[in-house]
Amino acid sequence: MHAKATVDGTVIAETDKYEFVEGNVYFPPDSIKDFSATMTPTDHTTHCYWKGTSHYYTINVNGKALENAAWYYPEPLEKAMNIKDHVAFYKNKVKIEKE
């Protein structure tokens, strides 16, 4: 299985090892292209009753900043440990392809 995330045709993440949870592809952190330049942490958080508190990133690509367009769980609850630190993207901001 292969997954790829793109913004305006630029690949920002690609992997053969991902987690698929509630219709979202969760990419391992090492699959994000140039992570430190592409992903900027924000102060935004949300909470899921079974996954825990998610933290967000702004995606920076080709001079474009997509605020809070990606999220991850740094300390997930027990049932969601498989997605710890994995990054998911909002489908209305990032194109996700999964095979």
Image (tube, helix red, strand yellow):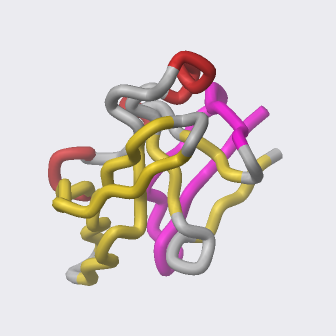
Q: Position of residue 43 (x, y in %)?
A: 17, 60
Most extreme residue toward the right, as rendered? 99
Residue 96's spot in the image, x, y percent? 65, 61
Side of 8 where 55 appears, left or right: left
Quadrant of the snapshot with the C terminus: top right
Horizontal side of residue 58 vs 80, given as left or right: left
In-image side of 97 versus 43 (left or right): right
Is the residue 25 above or below the residue 9 in the image?
above
Report the residue at 47% width, 31% height from top: 28
Q: Residue at x 63, y 31 (%)?
A: 18
Q: Residue at x 71, y 57 (%)?
A: 97
Q: Say which quarter of the image contains residue 87.
A: top left
- Determine the image quadrant of residue 84: top left
On-image quarter of the N terminus: top right
In the image, residue 16 above or below residue 72: above
Provide the residue span drawn in magenta. Answer: 1-21
Vertical position of residue 32 compared to residue 58: above or below? above
Residue 10: give x, y in percent of width and height.
Answer: 45, 68
Exactly how many numbered labels are in the figure? 0
- 54 part of magenta stretch: no
At 56% from the left edge and 58% from the top edge, which residue is drawn? 5
Along the viewing direction, whichever of 21 and 93 lies nearer the viewer: 21
SS majority, magenta:
strand
Q: Is residue 14 above or below residue 81?
A: below
Residue 31 image point, x, y percent: 44, 36
